[in-house]
Image (cartoon, coloured by chain):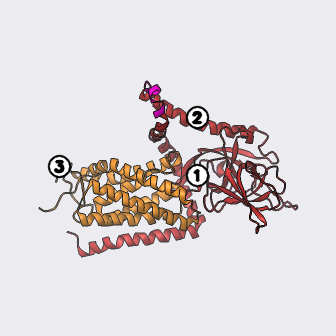
Amino acid sequence: MPTARTRLAHRIIPFVLVVVAIVLVTFSIRAQAQVDSAQSQASDQSVAIQEFAQRATQPVRDLIGWFGDIRTARDERDQLAQENAVLRSDLAKAEVNQQDGEELRGLLGYIRSPAFPQTKNYQPRAARVVARSPSLISSTVVVDAGDAVGVKVGDPVLAGVAQSADIGGAALIGRVEQTTPETATISLLSNANVAVGATVSGRRGADGILQPSAADPSVLVLGFVRGSSVVKPGDRVITSGFLDPSGRLGSAYPRGLPIGVVSEARQSDANTYKSVLVVPWVDLGSFANVVILTGVGGGS
Amino acid sequence: MSATDPTFEIGEDDDFSDDYDVDAPDGQGSRWIKTVLIPILILMVAIYLEIALAIDARVLGAIPNFALVALVALALRYGPAWGAVIGFVSGLLIDIAVQAPLGMSALVLTPIGWGVGVFAQRRRRVSLAMAVTVVLIASIICTAADIVVATAVNNDSIAWSTIAIAGTAGVMFTVLAGIILLPVLRRLMGVPARSSA
């Protein structure tokens, strides 16, 4: 039988742990740099293990992908009845490879296209997503390229856009928030802390600041657009890449990076500015490969 | 009781020192494996599975919360104190793995582990149906607490329609995982022997 002292200790332990958790969260936020460094070192070492876990769980993820296709497969069940389990498994694997291939082809096409920023010596660095928070509210991802290959804080990050060669094959998804030698944490455009200077392509004076919508982070809002400017649904939104005349202050993003397409432009009679709703080219919740544009200067 | 009865039964004194009423007589090595190694293994596998699936295997924006299922199974077996410790440790491991603010997940999982342990301690024996119900309630609380803590810590904006779909799907997937995994976990952990009667 446990003693009264043991029982008391067992009752105190949960409260102590909750207090420790609160202290850790507070410390983690206030001393973000130091804690992130320690966490990142641990994460560097865990990248290899995470990649191993990814490969080890590939059959499980393939199986989940297979379940996702069941609804479509029911309509064609008679035709597919002769397919055996091995072929279904091969099909699921092929679909995953095809999705990866489309993303990578888009990224490669973008790097080779005239749309790739030519004004400076930009170096494209390909990277793969190795961690995404399991939380429902996720606006950061971790990729397997860090400052050892030249990735810096502030570098723009793009992801491939399948079947959209007319925008060059890739579009902006965010910027590098922090780096370690082997990894980089990317803040996505859906992160409330990310703002991008953007403009509506081909519309004079339609410049503004792009931020996620408070109601739905999957939609972006181009704010502070002059009310007199003409903006229509279907117009393309790109980075404005502003630079002040002295050349000392400039956007972290080069001009012309594709972002998304205008879905709606709002302006009330009382407002001087328009609010332009923008749907990003890239689904910010489902990409596996990215390209980081190094050599931008970052940090702004 | 037999080791094959479909119930979770907590140890007499909420401690790892319990014996196990298994079919074959256990030596010290076997007891150590069941009381220490298997719980750690269960927790690590659950966390890695959850993180690996979170990368690109989301359905309706959600994945099963394997860590929560493992936590419920372990807390039902080992009681409130160890439930809180296991919740705290698994929370820290998740935060380190996904580079989230340290302590954010621990803040959610520690009270859940403790609460499930208290429930198990008061019930003494918990049937599988009741354990699945505990997973359902814990999953709802965990999802709500996750949103509250993430919003407070990260200051993120919330898309309620997206959260409602993903949250509901996540709870359903977690309950489904609980239905499948809880009997397996109970069998892996064994059943504590009753010290008298």
- The residues tagged by marks 2 and 3 sit, at their Cα atoms, a distance apart of 53 Å
User: Badge 1 is on which residue?
Assistant: A142
Circle 2 crowding by C-alpha within 10 Å: few under 14, some 14–19, many from 20: few
Shown colour of chain A? red
- The residues tagged by marks 2 and 1 sit, at their Cα atoms, a distance apart of 22 Å
User: Badge 3 is on which residue?
Assistant: B25
Shown colour of chain B? orange
Task: Tell me if residue A71 can be seen.
Answer: yes
Looking at the picture, how far across and down is residue A50, in whole percent? 50, 47
Looking at the picture, how far across and down is residue A242, in whole percent? 81, 57
User: Badge 2 is on which residue?
Assistant: A98
Residue B186: mark in rendering: none
Q: Which amino acid does label 2 sit on?
A: Gln
Q: What subunit carries mark 3?
A: B
Looking at the picture, how far across and down is residue B159, in whole percent? 57, 59
Q: Residue at x 50, y 36 (%)?
A: A72
Q: Is residue B172 above or below residue A195?
A: above
**The one of A286 and A174 positioned closer to us in this rendering:** A286
Q: What residue type is labelled 1?
A: Val
- Residue at the extreme left of the image, as rendered: B197
Q: What subunit carries mark 2?
A: A
Please state, as top left, top right, bottom left or bottom right, where the C terminus of chain B lies in the image. bottom left
Magenta residues span A74-83
- Relative to B176, A197 lies left or right: right
Magenta stretch: residue A53 in it?
no
- Secondary structure under the numbered disc 1 in the rendered image: strand
In primary-sequence order, the first of circles 2 and 1 is: 2
Task: Tell me if residue A151 can be seen.
Answer: no
Q: What subunit carries mark 1?
A: A
**The one of A53 and A279 positioned closer to us in this rendering:** A279
Q: What residue type is labelled 3?
A: Pro
